[in-house]
């Protein structure tokens, strides 16, 4: 395979791929790498035609890791030297999902759930023990060179570049920009904003959002920062102990695992008693009373109308469940099974 070489000297206001210098890509490059001359490599005849549909297809994927079995004590250590016994740990256990072209999907789970292992099989770094994976119609570990032309990967702030991918010297906050220099159709982001300040996080989220909407780049995002997911993802896949426990929209996840809402009422004066039909009082302090209710059973308008007609209200608000709280609740409920 032959490559053509293009050197871009990136300065403020210059946008790779945009004659007008506009967009989040320009902002990210200019902010993070203004002093860097970037060596951009692309194969001759690089094909940007649409990938197979669905872009990513995973069926009954499994991955086992084998380690020598260790026995206690000195004799046990000697025994371990002369035995072929192994301990098998299943990191991914029958995972199945599909991702269409242009989707931006959150891939969530607690530490050790199998997220990074799944991503490494999707990129071709690891070979599955069982199951099937196709990315753009290619089997990643069989068609490694061709698959590498279609993907960009960022693992925990460090860009994972293949031997045949564009080479770039990048800094901590430039990893995402480095992964996108050759405009791959699929992007895997593993904790892309961990350790960054608020401004840097927002720049990266804006870049990913524009990339997905403008270029129809397919993105799989793994993160423990639910603000990333709330901002970017409409769909999430949640795994635990290597198995998918939820695959669907963020809104449905909230409805299923956190159906209640909280109505916060501010009163002009303290009252001995305040009642709200169809709601449960959960807190009361300094003229502020909070009620929990299920909107499937109690209409918001009816609840608010009943309170306003009976009590001197200065302000009120509805508190929606946040995704981080929902995910934590799911993890807590599953802890006894680990």
Image (spheres, helix red, strand yellow):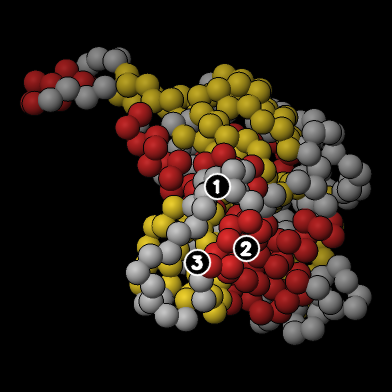
Q: Residues within 10 Å of mark 3 (few under 14, many from 20)?
A: some
Most extreme residue toward the front, as rendered? 310
Work out how far the residue at label 2 is from the one at label 1, CA to CA, in angstroms.
16 Å
The tag earlier along the polypeptide, 2 or 3, is 3
Quarter in which the C terminus is drawn = top left
- Kindly state the secondary structure of the residue where label 3 is placed: strand
Q: Is residue 136 above or below residue 225?
A: above
Q: Earlier in the sequence, mark 2 or mark 1?
A: 1
Residue at the image position 55 percent from the left and 47 percent from the top: 294
How far apart marks 3 and 1 lie (CA) works out to 14 Å
Q: Is residue 172 visible?
A: no
Disc 2: CA contacts within 10 A as few (<14), some (14-19) or many (>=20): few
Any mark on residue 264, and which? 3
Closer to the N terminus: mark 3 or mark 1? 3
Q: Quadrant of the N terminus?
A: top right
User: Between residues 100 and 116, which one lies in front from this camera angle?
Assistant: 100
Residues at circles 2 and 3 in contact by the CB criterion of under 8 Å: no
- Which residue is tagged 2? 305
Of badges 2 and 3, nearer the viewer stands 2
Identify which residue, 281 or 325, lies in the foreground: 281
Which residue, given by chain and number where applicable, does mark 1 sit on? 294
Q: Position of residue 104 (x, y in %)?
A: 71, 49
48 with respect to 165 (left or right): right
Tell me the quarter of the picture where residue 300 sits: bottom right
The reply to whether dot 3 and dot 1 touch (C-beta < 8 Å) is: no
Residue 5 location, x and y as percent? 81, 62
């Amino acid at each position: 395979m032959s490559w053509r070489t293009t050197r871009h000297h990136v300065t403020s206001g210059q946008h790779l791929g945009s004659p007008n210098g506009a967009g989040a890509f320009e902002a990210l490059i200019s902010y993070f790498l203004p002093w860097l001359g970037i060596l951009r490599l692309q194969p001759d005849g690089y094909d940007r035609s649409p990938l197979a549909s669905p872009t990513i297809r995973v069926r009954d994927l499994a991955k086992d890791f084998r380690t020598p079995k260790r026995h206690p004590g000195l004799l046990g250590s000697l025994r371990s030297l002369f035995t072929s016994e192994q301990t098998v740990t299943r990191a991914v256990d029958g995972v199945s999902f599909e991702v269409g072209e242009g989707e931006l999907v959150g891939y969530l789970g607690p530490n050790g759930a199998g997220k990074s292992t799944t991503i490494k099989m999707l990129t071709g770094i690891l070979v599955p023990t069982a199951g099937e994976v196709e990315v753009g119609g290619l089997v990643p570990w069989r068609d490694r060179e061709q698959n590498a032309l279609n993907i960009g990967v960022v693992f925990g702030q460090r860009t994972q570049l293949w031997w045949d991918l564009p080479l770039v010297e990048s800094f901590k906050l430039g990893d995402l920009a480095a992964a996108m220099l050759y405009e791959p159709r699929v992007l895997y982001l593993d904790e892309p904003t961990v350790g960054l300040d608020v401004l840097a996080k927002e720049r990266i989220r804006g870049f990913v959002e524009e990339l997905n909407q403008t270029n129809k780049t397919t993105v799989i995002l793994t993160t423990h920062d639910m603000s990333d997911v709330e901002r970017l993802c409409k769909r999430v896949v949640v795994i635990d102990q290597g198995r998918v426990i939820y695959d669907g929209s963020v809104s449905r996840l909230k409805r299923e695992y956190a159906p209640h809402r909280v109505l916060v009422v501010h009163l002009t004066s303290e009252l001995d008693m305040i009642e709200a039909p169809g709601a449960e009082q959960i807190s009361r302090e300094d003229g502020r009373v909070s009620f929990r209710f299920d909107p499937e059973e109690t209409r918001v308008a009816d609840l608010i109308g009943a309170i306003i007609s009976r009590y001197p209200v200065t302000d009120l608000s509805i508190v929606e469940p946040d995704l981080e709280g929902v995910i934590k609740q799911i993890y807590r409920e599953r802890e006894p099974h680990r």
